[in-house]
Amino acid sequence: MAARTLSRLLSRSLSSSSSSSGASASLLRSPLGRKSEGLINTNRFSTAAAVQELITPQVSINYTQHLINGKFVDAASGKTFPTLDPRTGEVIAHVAEGDAEDINRAVSAAREAFDNGPWPKMSAYERCRILLRFADLVEKHNDEIAALEAWNNGKLYEQAAKAEVPMFVRLFRYYAGWADKIHGLTVPADGDYHVQTLHEPIGVAGQIIPWNFPLLMFAWKVGPALACGNTIVLKTAEQTPLTALLVAKLLHEAGLPPGVLNIVSGYGPTAGASLASHMDVDKLAFTGSTDTGKTVLELAARSNLKPVTLELGGKSPFIVFEEADIDKVVEIAHFALFFNQGQCCCAGSRTFVHERIYDEFLEKSKERALRRVVGDPFKKGVEQGPQIDSKQFEKVLRYIKSGIDSNATLECGGGRLGSKGFFVQPTVFSNVQDDMLIAKDEIFGPVQTILKFKDINEVIRRANATRYGLAAGVFTNNVSTANTLMRALRAGTVWINCFDVFDAAIPFGGYKMSGIGREKGIYSLHNYLQVKAVVSPLNNPAWL
Ligand SMILES: NC(=O)c1ccc[n+]([C@@H]2O[C@H](COP(=O)([O-])OP(=O)(O)OC[C@H]3O[C@@H](n4cnc5c(N)ncnc54)[C@H](O)[C@@H]3O)[C@@H](O)[C@H]2O)c1
């Protein structure tokens, strides 16, 4: 298709901003009666002046086909599917729709590149240098990549430009650094034998990623797999296929040989399921919902028993003890839940507050939510954009209704914003009980649930009483309380007096139904390596 340019679309929607059409730059009326151009300001006390400036980065959609064996190609069936701008629900591009045949072609290219191509035979230092060159190129195209990410996902442009693309770059530099430091051991064993372990690439890695952080999920998976010398078939989420194709182009410009990274766009039950069940895929790494995680694990087991890592959903407790600094923690709790429109696997989605500070904490949390600025993610000062699509948007509204029906107290929000796009009011519930659906299920939206607790043992029990175990936050000035909680909480990450601190070196993953295995850090390398024991007899050894 002809390249579409974001700045052109933005200027078009700006010039029509006096109509009440869309979220991008149209007039949207907040439920609180404020009305302002191009934004929905939930602040009764107004910060509108700070949020007028529209950022118009240059970006166009140039890549919409599959990337197979270093070339952009149409789907075998010739089919395409639409990808949307969540601000308006309008189609921004038609993308090749992959199915089993496209997956077959991509897996064959990856197999050939692994078995006979230069990548696994290249020195680790050369692989490192390609990854470093790629990181430099991404850095150079930072704003363009961030704009495409925001356009396709609805996330804040500034969040993508200032945090997510730089984190992407950091992840690739981190794994580039590992490429030439991966090695086995010599092992002292009983008997006259020389024993060593070889850490070998696992082969063709199948990777399936979600839509909430399309670029970061790409980096978490592709970075370590390439550092270890594997080849890849990546299936992007159907909602957000665009940025993976753009950065993959840059990776080839950096010197990646053809066939090493193949990308197929398409839907889960067709393209995703074909990848998970493919007999020639040696490893599967999946990030997405717990239900789909179970499906892909089963597909992997029923096909060739490929090893599977799973990064799944969460319902993470955010626990505030009585001595915490209330103003500061209200802000962190707000961020922990509402960041990225609440579409975070590790969102602090059960805010447990000690009964002595509960009322004050609740009042301030509500005030903060009312001040949250919702609007066009390309505007400076906007804090919240739209949900990703109508399905997620409706799911969030259903959970809000379920909270109301189950007699939790709706403190603020509770509905949609505007009439176009997928904007949801920042919503806070109090009087939430553990057995309510809003306290048990992953809502994946801007809905904060605030629960009251009395003592440490009670809150540990309640925080752990979930099928999930992805992350937790603990806010206390008492060292002993912190020490107890960091061990007692059954979660892959425990943040003490902070939340959402990510770094390439920090492992991430879940206990219980939040997943299997860890990504990032040194731990991710283990996902992409086979360990081979090599044993040979020693004649007359000088030492053992
Ligand atoms: N633990 C983590 O690191 C982490 C990170 C981000 C998101 N998540 C989780 O992801 C979920 C949100 O993402 P989502 O709605 O895109 O999840 P999802 O499970 O619907 O989809 C994730 C991916 O799986 C694919 N898929 C769907 N059905 C499939 C099937 N039958 N076979 C193979 N692939 C299939 C989709 O096309 C998509 O690419 C949330 O539950 C969130 O918590 C977890």
Image: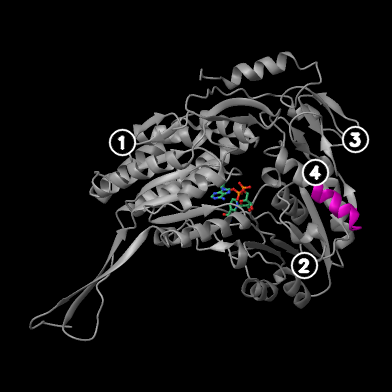
Q: Residue at x 66, y 63 (%)?
A: 472
Q: Name the residue under label 1.
A: 255
In the picture of the structure, the residue carrying the numbered disc 3 is: 32
Residue bearing the label numbered 2? 321
Name the spot of residue 332 as percent of width and height, x first.
72, 53
Where residue 78 appears, x then y in whole percent? 48, 28
Mark number displayed over residue 478: none
Are discs 4 and 1 less than 8 Å apart at CB? no
Badge 1 crowding class, 10 Å Cα cut-off, few under 14, some 14 to 19, many 20 or more, is some
Whether residue 271 sits left or right of residue 487 in the image: it is left
SS label for mark 1: loop
In the depicted structure, whether residue 148 falls above or below residue 187: above
List x then y, in percent, for residue 381. 71, 33
Pointer 4 or 3: first along the chain: 3
Three-letter code, disc 1:
Gly
Question: Is the CB of mark 1 within 8 Å of ligand 1?
Answer: no
Q: Can you give x and y, in whole percent of width and height, for residue 512 in the image?
A: 61, 68
Q: Give the range drawn in magenta.
A: 398-409
Residue type at the position of mark 2: Phe
- Residue 314 is a magenta residue: no
The amino acid beneath tag 3 is: Leu
Q: Which residue is drawn at 86% across and 62% down?
A: 358
Label 3 sits on a secondary structure element that is loop
Sequence-wise, the earlier of marks 1 and 2 is 1
Would you call the spot at circle 3 few (<14 residues within 10 Å), some (14-19), or many (20 or more)? few
Instruction: Give SS at disc 2.
Output: loop
Earlier along the polypeptide chain: callout 3 or callout 1? 3
